[in-house]
Amino acid sequence: MSLSFDQLHGTNKRAAEILLGNDRGGYTVPSAKLYPFQWNWDSALVALGFSVFDPDRAWQEVESLLSAQWDNGMVPHIIFWKEEKSYFPGPEQWGTTDIAKAPPTSGITQPPVAATVIERLLAEDIDAHRDRAAKLLPKLDRWHQWFLDARDPDGRGVVAIMHPWESGRDNLPDWDRPLSFVDTTGIGGYHRRDTDIVNKDERPKNNDYDHYMALVRFGRDCNWNTDIIARDCPFWVAEPGMNAILRRAESDLIRMARCLGNDDIAARATARFARLDAGFELLWSETVGGYVTLDLRRGEHAIGLTSGSWLAMFAGPVEPARATTMASTLTHWLDQVEHGVPSFDPAHELFDSIRYWRGPVWAMINWMIATGLIEHGETDLAERIRRDTQSLIDQSDFREYFCPVTGRGGGGTDFSWTASMSLYWAARPETLPIPAHLSQSTAPTGTADQENT
């Protein structure tokens, strides 16, 4: 049941005010100055916060996001609804005007958390939201199919990213070695806008940005042709966060399709889920004792865990021995810092407590990790992460991310997904799937436990 805005108080009301302040009329910007457009997974997660006090506005958020879907099924990672020269790279750098529908967009995607969000919106009131959800299911189906066609054309069961930005976790140390093979000749002469707004010690370094822009150039030069990208892109990496979120999204899409009586979509999603479920094993590293990034060009596993490693439990049931090992390692991580979950191993030499994705804590990742832990019976550990997240917000307000050592905030201010996670987590501390008896059939192998949480 949703509340009215007037029924919110304290931190919850402040969170709602941030969402309303970043609302641009049907879509929400992550942060007014730093990110002035609609971002893909930011937008989906923001819908959860709106659902607490304005369900109609929550549905508008995901509807506007999916309205920018390309003809090939991809949902882009940035939608440039209005002209704004303060952001780089803008539409002219992406060069997608001949491919994307109006408005212009970027040429890559982001983790498809939208299906998981929409399932939760639907579960709030299935009768009230049935028609809106039914209109979005075909879009989700086409997007999920695009991932397997465009990012796993060899059928290995893991989807690749062709750019670090596509992972949503832009600056991970995981990308350092794969990026080292990207030719940056001729890249330069651009002006970064992010470091005009945010301390440069909190953002990717210029050398990283050169590699990012070289990959944008590659995509633009091949007109974002997915066959050429899959064959020739120098950066072709499978990582646990993206694959876990897609795997979860498929099981949530199956549940919605069954609930709404769309057997065709349920069947296609079930087939995709089986492929992803089998392929996820490729990301397990016995050496590290967890799910890690795999450089598909060179067949190399990363040598460290990231916060995305724990999303394996968000994706679906992990075998008990592995889940126990992962929970133990996560507890060890939390014991090394004041606030969790750091985005990279705090004992690793490349850990940087305040630089973008190389150490900081992110509220929305914490929510996904905690959700997976609850579904694996690790409720105390999940509650510890929830308390950590709220204490960071209480200390440093609704920042983009937080230092796990000191708790100070970094990146953008009045950040939408931090506000959304705080508000939604307070209102919905447990998982809220569509009731099993309404999904008309059993879940795909490996997801039955999720339906009984």
Image (cartoon, rainbow, N blue to C red):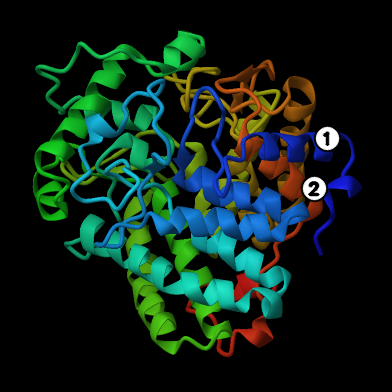
In front: 450, or 299?
450
Q: Earlier in the sequence, mark 2 or mark 1?
A: 1
Q: Residue 326: x and y, percent?
A: 56, 47
Report the residue at 82% width, 39% height from top: 13
Q: Mark 2 is on which residue type? A: Ala
Residue annotated with mark 1: 11
Number of marks in the rendered image: 2
Task: Point out which mark residue 426 bears.
Answer: 2
Q: Residues within 10 Å of mark 2 (few under 14, many from 20)?
A: some
Q: Mark 1 is on which residue type? A: Thr
Secondary structure state at the residue bearing disc 2: helix
Report the residue at 42% width, 58% height from top: 67
243 sits to left or right of 312: left
- Marks 2 and 1 close (CB-CB < 8 Å): yes
Location of the N terminus by quadrant is bottom right
Report the residue at 53% width, 43% height from top: 42
